[in-house]
Image: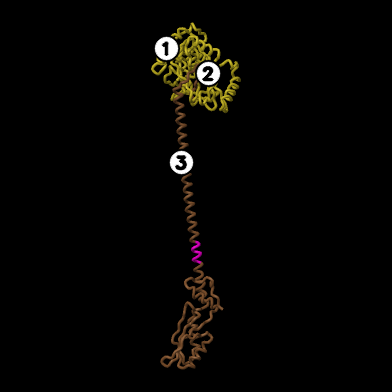
Chain colours: A yellow, B brown
Amino acid sequence: MVIIENFFIHYKRPAQLVFAGENYLDIYKYVNNSFQKTRSFDDAPIIDLTTESFGAAARELSIAGGGGGGAANAIDTGIILNSAYYIFNILDFEKIPFREGLRKEIVEWRLRKVFPENIEDYDHRFYKLDKNKILSILFKKSLKEKIENLFNQSRINLTYMGNSTVNSIDNVLRQKSSPDFFIEIDRSLFIVVFQKNSVPFYIRKFRGEHEDEVVSEVVKTINYVKNSYAQTPRTYSIIANRCQLNLDVIKQELLGQEIRALDLKNKEKLFLPG
Amino acid sequence: MRRINYNTADNKKIDYLKFTFYSSIVVAISLIFLTMGIGNLWSIDQKERRQKEQAIQDRQELEKLTQENTRREEDVAKRKKDWKAQVDFANWLITEKQFSVVEKLELLEKNLPEGAFFTQVNLDMANPSLLRIGVAADSLPRLIETYHNFSAYQPEIQDEKEDEGLLKAGLVLHFKTKSQKPGAAEKPKQKPKEEKIEEDEYY
């Protein structure tokens, strides 16, 4: 079933997107074969939005862009959330069962060992990365329902709900030369993703308000990967959406550790669906 | 790594254009394989049919050859039999010395009295037990002596006449054959009469 779905079923790319970052919303419209940012709304944390506070954004979304016209509810719209509301786990298995039901069972069994909350409260999806690794993504069901209600009440046709880190993984690892790890930054939220042979093996999420704090966390994470996974990263990239910190401090520190920066193509839009 | 199609929206929209495209690819590949499969089966079937036809032809050819061979073997056996009969007959003749002319002439010479001589000696190769001779004698007692001397050979006097002061007579002498001729039952077709005579003469 999964094989058929992966091969045959492809979902339509929405004509416009809302990126729900750290207390802000960015609106993107598909124009000239790419998404272009058309408006931003600050002080709009997705978790606290109501139909009223979402009104301005909804009105912007009802204006036809390059991807379609007419009423707002006729335009396919997507939302991308940053990873603040997501929980990622990369689980290692000796062997991953072929049967989908059995696979779900063992993934949830393993997850229950490391995740203290009730999994039933989360929208849980998992993806096979290679023959031994599975990426598990948990997203609070209550937030999912809240967002869907918000869009419904605003009469916006929500056809896509994605995550910026997952999109970044997809887009970065598909590039010709991908870094050993990348740091996704959205204001004070940092996500570090390590990969080997284009397969992510470790994801860490942390918050940092000051450069020193962030540098320390990044170095600790690199050391953890060196010790736990016997991998020494040599290259990195930074995908920064809205960063309030001086990134040069981080770059200098990494350069001191002989880790060089790798420039990525189209790095401003790597968190958007490919 | 496979693309992670992460989309938690309930109202996802399937891209039917892509679905049609990928389905067409699958259908096209399936059709190619199906065509190849049918083609393969057809060629295998043709090959088997050709082989069967060839086998039938070979069998017919073999049957024909076998029949020909049997016919030839029979022919050879017949010829061998005929040849053996002829060889046996020849051997018998050699063994029996039926045509021993020297022996017969010796007998003639031995039994011919003084004052008599031969005017002719006829040997019949087809009937070796008969010998036709012509004798001439200067007097009647000599001629009678001659008859007497050849009495053991059942002389048949064919004719008697006087010519230029000599008494001449034609005689047929009968010599006995020594044994039964081999293959007597299978008489040579070309001379049935002589064979019959021989059979009559066996004692």
Magenta range is B73-80
Instruction: For mark 2, name the chain.
Output: A
Which of B77 and A2 lies nearest the eye of the viewer? B77
Residue receiving disc 1? A70
Where B43 sits versus B110, above or below? above
Task: Say above or below: A79 vs A196.
Answer: above
Specify whether disc 2 shares its chain with disc 3.
Answer: no
Q: Determine whether the residue tagged by mark 3 lies in a helix, strand or loop.
A: helix
Q: Marks 1 and 3: which is nearer the front?
A: 3
Q: Earlier in the sequence, mark 2 or mark 1?
A: 1
Most foreground residue, A256 or A129 = A129
Q: How many angstroms separate mark 1 from mark 3 (CA)?
A: 60 Å
Is residue B45 placed above or below B154 in the rendered structure? above
Q: Which residue has dot 3 on it?
A: B43
Q: Which residue type does callout 3 highlight?
A: Ser
Residue drawn at x 59%, y 19% is A114
Q: Main secondary structure of the magenta part?
A: helix
Q: Do the residues at pointers 2 and 1 share their chain?
A: yes
Q: Where B131 falls versus B26 (above or below)? A: below
- Residue occupying image coordinates x 48% and y 61%: B72
Choose between A31 and A164: the one closer to the eye. A31
Label 1: state its secondary structure: loop
State the mark number for residue A204: 2
Looking at the rendered structure, the secondary structure element under dot 2 is: strand
